[in-house]
Image (cartoon, rainbow, N blue to C red):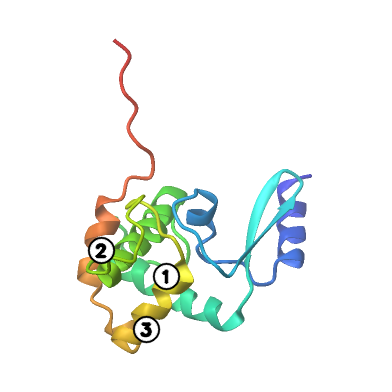
Amino acid sequence: MDEDQYRSTYNNVNPNRCVFEKSLNNRRCDCSLKHRFLIATREGVACRSEKSLARCTKLLNAMRDNARFVLKVITVDGPMPHNKELRVQAGGMMGLQKLMFSNDDSLPDKAPDTVEDIHQVVDATLLKYGSIENIPYRLIVQDIAACQVRLKRRSKK
């Protein structure tokens, strides 16, 4: 299957593509509203809620815009290159989770470098701050800057 045919099939099969697909496929984040599917040997992720997809899209665009300086990007008019996009998605959601649940003992502390449920974190954020515009992005951008997409390999001695 060539790339154009794949993209066409993907868009037909998945009209509600999850905007956090890279971080979900990278296993850095999880979401209770995700729906995984396979096309050929590639894994895709759809969102089961159009309302939540719209909120996540708005949140991700705000995180991209606020992270421009730390990612050394002048303008953002959509998805960034893969590694920078993954840093925004995973690092941004980890920062948001830390911001929302840092004092909550009920949050599992098994893996601080993963997000248990994107939907839960976004809902809690909107409850606390009222809108996406009111979120203190300066705190989240620190986690985006600190996010490592790939762990550094140890040199063989």
Residue 151 coordinates in the image, percent (x, y): 35, 36
Residue 24 versus residue 32: which sits nearer the camera? Answer: 32
Q: Which residue occupies 75% across, 51% down?
A: 39
Measure how far apart labels 3 and 2 are at the Cα level. Answer: 18 Å
Q: Is residue 58 above or below residue 112?
A: below
Q: How many marks?
A: 3
Q: Residues within 10 Å of mark 2 (few under 14, many from 20)?
A: many
Residue bearing the label numbered 1: 60
Answer with mark 1 or mark 3, whichever residue precedes in sequence.
Answer: 1
Q: Which residue occupies 72% across, 59% down?
A: 10
* Residue 29 in sight: yes
Residue 141: assigned label: 2
Residue 31 shown left or right of residue 149 in the figure = right
Quarter where residue 60 is shown: bottom left
Residue 29 coordinates in the image, percent (x, y): 46, 57
Residue bearing the label numbered 3: 126
Q: Amino acid at mark 2?
A: Val
> What quarter of the picture does the N terminus occupy?
top right
Q: Amino acid at mark 1?
A: Leu
Answer with mark 3 or mark 2, whichever residue precedes in sequence.
Answer: 3
Give SS at disc 3: helix
Work out which residue is located at the far top of the displayed protein and give it.
Answer: 157
Q: Amino acid at mark 3?
A: Leu
Q: Dots 2 and 1: beta carbons under 8 Å?
A: no
